């Protein structure tokens, strides 16, 4: 199965966001107050060329995030984006020969601005996200939490994923996104409470499109949680679940912002291989 890593520009965040420092509210404030910026990181969207139609996982960043609400401290102090119009997901898909009507399904790992930024390119797709994530991101409360619901396309009306009680490896719930059962969503709570990841089964391997379950493969392997998720125990459990998944079957692990993700996908380099 062909999977494309589509880099929609770059993002720069603080080191204390990639790997949390301390605990509780202190940990969550560090990405804002710290002066230690990390290296610029990629922002990936993913396109799966599936026999049942193209599936896009996350829509990446977009040029509108170069200007962010001035009153929000996270936007003003903790994040910077670089992206040009031709780097948005739509134009890049067109260059791959994938038109907007070819994309049957879009799945959002969560609704942070560098994951839902490119929604405008998918007016003909069915779009899925977790119902809790959709509710959290909407309205004034969503805006306070650092989402940008006012920038969603007017037609944006995501369908809540209907989780099934069918276990997938260490994950107690899952959703099959294809009739063939080879593209599966699993809950990866932590970075946001209702964050999800998508697993593609391809022969003996599985490819995990992990969103922001961790920023890096290395932090996942060390069990190092990020600086933004509110629930430390949930993040630790998710990272442990991912390690168990990788131990049970060869897994290519692809976080959205890991500088190695594209190469890892190209070489189908599995965790600890
Ligand atoms: Zn995020």
Image (spheres, helix red, strand yellow):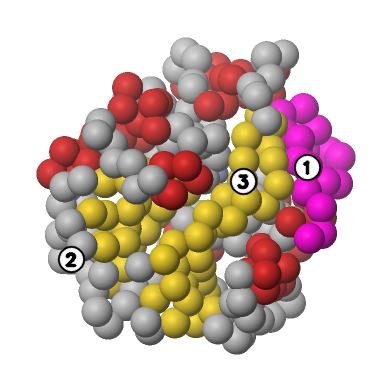
**Ligand 1 image-quadrant field:** top right
Whether the residue carrying mark 3 lies under 8 Å from ligand 1 is answered with no
In this view, the residue farthest toward the front is: 267
Quadrant of the rendered image containing residue 242: top left
Stretch in magenta: 66-86
Query: 261 or 177: which is nearer to us?
Result: 261
Q: Which residue is mark 3?
A: 43
Query: 84 or 62: which is nearer to us?
Result: 84
> Is label 2 in contact with label 1 (beta carbons under 8 Å)?
no
Q: What residue lies at 42% left-to-right and 49% top-to-bottom?
A: 265
Q: Which residue is mark 1?
A: 82
User: With 238 as the anchor, is 147 left or right in this view?
Assistant: right
**Which is nearer the N-term, disc 2 or disc 1?**
1
**Within-10-Å neighbours for mark 2: few <14, some 14–19, many 20+:** few
Q: What residue lies at 62% left-to-right and 34% top-to-bottom?
A: 41
Q: What residue lies at 74% left-to-right and 77% top-to-bottom?
A: 154
Quadrant of the rendered image containing residue 176: bottom left
Mark 1–mark 3 Cα distance, whole angstroms, equals 10 Å
Secondary structure under the numbered disc 3 in the rendered image: strand
Secondary structure under the numbered disc 2 in the rendered image: loop
Secondary structure under the numbered disc 1 in the rendered image: strand
**Residue 179 on image: x %, y %:** 27, 82
Q: Is residue 85 magenta?
A: yes
**Residue 202 on image: x %, y %:** 26, 63
Quadrant of the rendered image containing residue 29: top right
Q: Is residue 25 magenta?
A: no
> Is label 3 in contact with label 2 (beta carbons under 8 Å)?
no
Mark 2–mark 1 Cα distance, whole angstroms, equals 40 Å
Q: Which residue is mark 2?
A: 165
**Which is nearer the N-term, disc 1 or disc 3?**
3
The numbered mark at residue 195 is: none
Mark 3–mark 2 Cα distance, whole angstroms, equals 32 Å
């Amino acid at each position: 199965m062909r999977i494309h890593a589509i880099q929609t520009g770059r993002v720069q965040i603080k080191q204390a966001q990639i790997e949390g420092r301390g605990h509780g509210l202190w940990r969550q404030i560090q990405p804002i107050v710290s002066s230690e910026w990390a290296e610029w990181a990629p922002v990936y969207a993913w396109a799966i060329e599936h026999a049942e139609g193209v599936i896009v996982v996350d829509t990446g960043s977009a040029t509108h995030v170069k200007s962010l609400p001035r009153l929000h401290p996270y936007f003003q102090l903790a994040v910077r984006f670089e992206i040009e119009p031709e780097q948005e997901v739509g134009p890049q898909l067109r260059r791959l020969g994938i038109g907007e009507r070819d994309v049957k399904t879009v799945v959002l790992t969560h609704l942070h601005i560098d994951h839902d930024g490119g929604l405008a390119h998918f007016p003909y797709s069915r779009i899925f996200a977790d119902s809790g994530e959709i509710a959290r991101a909407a309205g004034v409360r969503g805006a306070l939490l650092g989402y940008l619901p006012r920038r969603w396309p007017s037609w944006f009306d995501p369908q809540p994923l209907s989780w099934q009680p069918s276990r997938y490896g260490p994950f107690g719930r899952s959703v099959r996104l294809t009739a063939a059962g080879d593209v599966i969503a699993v809950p990866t709570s932590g970075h946001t409470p209702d964050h999800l990841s998508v697993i593609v089964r391809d022969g003996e391997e599985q490819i995990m499109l992990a969103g922001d379950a961790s920023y890096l493969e290395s932090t996942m392997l060390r069990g190092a949680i990020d600086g933004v998720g509110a629930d430390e125990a949930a993040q630790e459990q998710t990272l442990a679940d991912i390690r168990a998944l990788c131990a049970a079957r060869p897994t290519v692990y692809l976080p959205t912002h890991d500088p190695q993700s594209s190469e890892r996908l190209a070489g189908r380099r599995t965790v600890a291989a």
